[in-house]
């Protein structure tokens, strides 16, 4: 259920590895941070998602692009590589420390958005925290060990960090609806399409399977033991199957099909381009700075936490 409520305090337990360990969530009234301009630094600025984020941040209310970090296109203007009509006069740099130092000297509220690589995420978040900046991390295939290390570090540093497996609000809503439906149906199969076969099964499919597993339901009992490849791959431990397609020109799509006596219930989410991630990104940037209000708190969203806990991003109004 998506609802409107006052800003909330969320505490999530540090033991993320155990499937049976439920996260502890508590709510209390909090005063939101001041509405000063948020200075945003984007790591991975020349990637497609990075260029799109530069454009989105530059146009967003209450935000200002303060740095573009990448090892490619060094010296080129961030606005020009993003297709903007006017230059932003912010060059692409390969020196994160210099950009963070400049923001720290101005004493402005800052957020580092990391689209880089799993191997560099921890060091990037550590550098950002050293200069007093929160981090939003959206790096596919990030390891659970890295997430756990980030949680421990940010708790000690009393800095906000948000690790997001998806920035698509539609994807989060799809997964929330799947959790609700899973209590009522005993058959569940995921059908997805992606342009790149190396991405299959997708993180969305894996997360859906994890979210609807371990809820006391066993799916597709009739042929759960079947090894026929035409029946697709089983994800998780409760029998959820995934069928993946790679077809040129086909949009990235994820659907989950539930069935019961006499009915089929289908949930579907289609993605046409990276623009779909920008509303979620801007929301994450605004919310992560609120975590700094609560010492020794960090919000980590990953495939091993139920998606309902991710919806805190949607629960707090602007």
Image (tube, grey):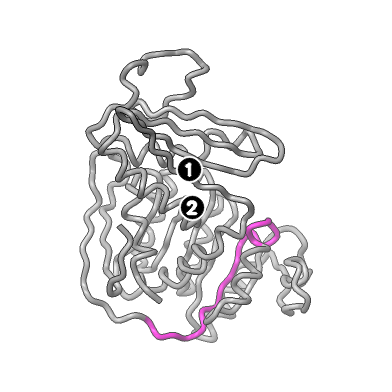
Left or right: residue 231 versus residue 18 is right
The residue tagged 2 is: 166
- Residue 31 quadrant: bottom left
Toward which corner of the image does residue 214 lie, by quadrant?
top left
**Which residue is denoted by mark 1 in the rendering?**
204
Tag on residue 69? none
The range drawn in magenta is: 33-50
Helix, strand or loop status at disc 1:
helix
Q: Is residue 20 magenta?
A: no
Residues packed near mark 2 inside 10 Å, few (<14), some (14 to 19) or many (20 plus): many
Q: Are marks 2 and 1 in contact (CB under 8 Å)?
A: yes
Q: Is residue 174 left or right of residue 106?
A: left
Q: Is residue 244 above or below residue 36?
A: above
Q: Residue at x 66, y 68 (%)?
A: 68
Q: Residue at x 32, y 53 (%)?
A: 308
Is residue 16 visible to the viewer in this orientation of the structure? yes
């Amino acid at each position: 259920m998506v609802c409107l409520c006052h800003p909330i305090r969320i505490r999530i337990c540090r033991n993320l590895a155990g499937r049976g360990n439920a996260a502890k969530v508590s709510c209390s009234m909090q005063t939101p941070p001041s509405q000063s301009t948020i200075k945003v630094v984007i790591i991975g600025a020349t990637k497609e998602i990075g260029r799109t984020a530069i454009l989105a941040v530059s146009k967003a209310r209450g935000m200002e692009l303060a740095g573009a970090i990448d090892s490619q296109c060094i010296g080129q203007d961030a606005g020009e590589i993003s297709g903007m009509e006017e230059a932003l006069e912010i060059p692409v740099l390969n020196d994160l420390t210099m950009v963070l130092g400049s923001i720290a000297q101005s004493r402005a509220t800052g957020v580092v958005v990391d689209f880089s690589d799993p191997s560099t995420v921890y060091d990037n978040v550590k550098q950002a925290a050293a200069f007093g900046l929160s981090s939003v991390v959206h790096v596919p295939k990030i390891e659970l060990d890295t997430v756990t290390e980030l949680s421990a570090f940010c708790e000690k540093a009393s800095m906000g960090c948000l690790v997001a497996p998806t920035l698509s609000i539609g994807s989060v809503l799809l997964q929330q609806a799947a959790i609700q439906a899973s209590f009522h149906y005993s058959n569940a199969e995921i059908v997805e399409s992606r342009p790149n076969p190396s991405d299959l099964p997708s993180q969305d499919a894996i997360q859906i399977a994890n979210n609807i597993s371990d809820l006391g339901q066993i799916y597709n009992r009739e042929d759960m033991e079947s090894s026929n490849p035409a029946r697709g791959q089983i994800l998780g431990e409760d029998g959820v199957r995934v069928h993946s397609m790679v077809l040129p020109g086909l949009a990235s799509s994820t659907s989950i099909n539930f069935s019961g006596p006499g009915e089929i219930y289908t949930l579907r989410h289609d993605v046409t381009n990276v623009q779909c991630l920008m509303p979620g990104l801007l929301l994450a940037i605004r919310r992560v700075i609120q975590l700094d209000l609560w010492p020794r708190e960090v919000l980590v969203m990953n495939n091993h936490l139920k998606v309902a806990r991710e919806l805190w991003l949607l629960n707090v109004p602007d």
